Amino acid sequence: MTTRTRRAIAATIAAASLAIAGGVAVAPAAVAAPAGSDLDYFSYAYPGLREGSVFETVTFERFEYLLGSEGTYAFLIGGPADETTNTAIAHIDAVAQTYGVEKIYVLDPRVDGDEVDIRTSSIATLQNQWTGAVTDFLNKDTTPAFGGEPGDDPYLFVYDKAHTAGGSEDRIVASLGGAVSPSSVATEEGAVAYRAQVSGVFDAVADGGSADVDTQSHFTFYKNEINRKHSATYKNAALYGGDIIEESDGADWTLKQITYPELVQLLESDGDHIILFGGTWCHNTRAVVKDVNRAASAAGVKTVYQFDLRLDGNSSDAWHIRDTASPLAYLYGDVVAKFFPNLRTQYIVAAGGGQKVDYYPGGDTTIAVASAKKLQVPYLIEYNKADAAAPIVQDWIQDKGDGTFTEYMTEWWWVAGLPGERNVNRYTTPEAWAAEQTKQWQFADEAIAKIDSFFAAAAVPSVGPSPSPSVEPSPSPSVDPSPSPSSSPSVEPVLTDAAVSVTGDLHPGGAIVVSGTGLPASTPNVTVEIRSTPKTLGTVSTTAAGAFRLETTIPTSIASGAHTVVVLIDGQVVASQAVTVAAAPTAAAASNSLAVTGGSGIPFAIVGGALVLLIAGAILVVARRRRATV
């Protein structure tokens, strides 16, 4: 597709008006580039702290990333809900300036900024993450000091993973712990004494009055983690692409990872904000981050705030607040209820099951459960609270024109114009695979064109790997490169390479085996359910080859008739198939069946129309090719 054609698509999409199901209107896409914002969280969260202080928040993901990085870094553990942090932070900032410290990285252990403290939480998976960081990083020291009562742990420290003492690991170069009360620094004498303690921390790494403390940019974090996670899963660069983020992307990097308290502050603040929901763990997010940054930078947007609904940047358990099963689901539900009245999603709440997020408002389990719309990632919005009824000014989503929507979930190799890998069992002829590739390239092209229109920026060619010379698909005849201004181009969903089978006794109480292939490799917490009223059959992890095998039993409460077996990853259905459950066998039939030993049972295989929808974000499509080196 030529740049000219792509620009035509972008202009058409920008002109399209958006609508949300239920009659709530979304404002038309802006003609001019969104202004964006660059808020100072710390001067907002800590009254009296100057703007432009030395502090920078880190998510738990980035905290562990920095602890594993080469260099010497200064950290502060605490948040607005900590008296010590509130009391000490302005003093620490003042002392750090005198030592030339550019950044102190701040981890708020209260993931909600208020009550949920990972150091003391009754939610085991939260506390286990903190304990893991203590064991793997912080207490690799000659005098381990972390893991006790939060008030006794060091809160300010300088860390170097390569630092040793007497030949032993001594990663905490210097630290300061204990409580600091407002009264202790209320007098000039008290303030001077406290600042002297802070100076002692920086003196440990100072030379000539300047502290040797390193910094690391958001760009470096994204480049290293996105490329590492992509190459770890998709090793064949000729098929799937090599590095996604290149050094040249860092010239005008706009993405900034934020915490949950920062997200709330952002949504409560005046102004125009660009927010990308997604994470480095998500292959669909990785596929478009490069272009989000490119388009935002070209439009003059200084900051795209990236928020990960997995608060630790990885786990699909309690840390994942967009999951009904998480005790922290209210953090997601409350945000949607309060700030996103015009949220548009592919999932439909009325469909039930995994298509909504159930939660107790405010985390209060004594009141009725509420349900929130469930967005999928990546998801890009422009937000401005000035319009209370429709604060989502525009969103990056495929509008089908009939009140339904599809989120843009594609893959880096399709965005980059690469061939991907053919599953010969599904695509039995070269022609079938070429048609599939064309659909995937088309959807990826639509996704990137919509990013350009979102930022109202000129659709300049992006840099990506060159397409395979053996693949030169023509645009699908069903896709008009110049769609009607009334709606975005619409392309039917396409199947992925996932496959599932069920064998055994398909009746209430019957033993069955559910097997899956073609799923993401080494993925934990893969859930298998039988529906319509969802009943969990089990939870498994996929192998390095992306397969699983689950031996389970159909619940006796399941009625005979039509049902669906579904496979979910991250609460999202990635595979499904209709099945028919027979009536429970009579006593006589059961007796007869027990008399037959060594048999294979009654086989039932799910074949043909095969399951599978949206593997971790399945994919719809519109045409696109790119040139670059792998």
Image: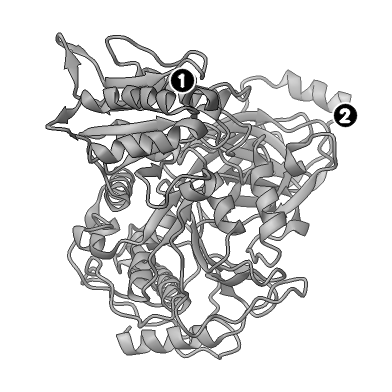
Pair 2/1: label in front? 1
- Helix, strand or loop for disc 1: helix
Q: Nearer the viewer, residue 75 or 622?
A: 75
Residue 165, percent across and down?
Answer: 18, 12
Q: How many marks?
A: 2
Residue 71 picture quarter: top left
Residue to which mark 1 is pinned: 131
Residue at (38%, 86%) from the top-left corner? 7
- Helix, strand or loop for disc 2: loop
Q: Looking at the image, is 592 positioned above or below residue 630?
A: above
Residue at (45%, 87%) from the top-left corner? 11
Q: Nearer the viewer, residue 291 or 299?
A: 299
The alpha-carbon separation of the residues under discs 2 and 1 comes to 53 Å
128 displayed left or right of 4? right
Residue 410, percent across and down?
Answer: 44, 62
Mark 2 Cα shell of 10 Å, populated few (<14), some (14-19), many (≥20): few
Q: Nearer the viewer, residue 593 or 558?
A: 558
Residue 110, percent across and down?
Answer: 55, 33
Res. 409 visible in picture = yes
Q: Looking at the image, is 78 positioned above or below residue 300?
A: above
Residue to which mark 2 is pinned: 586
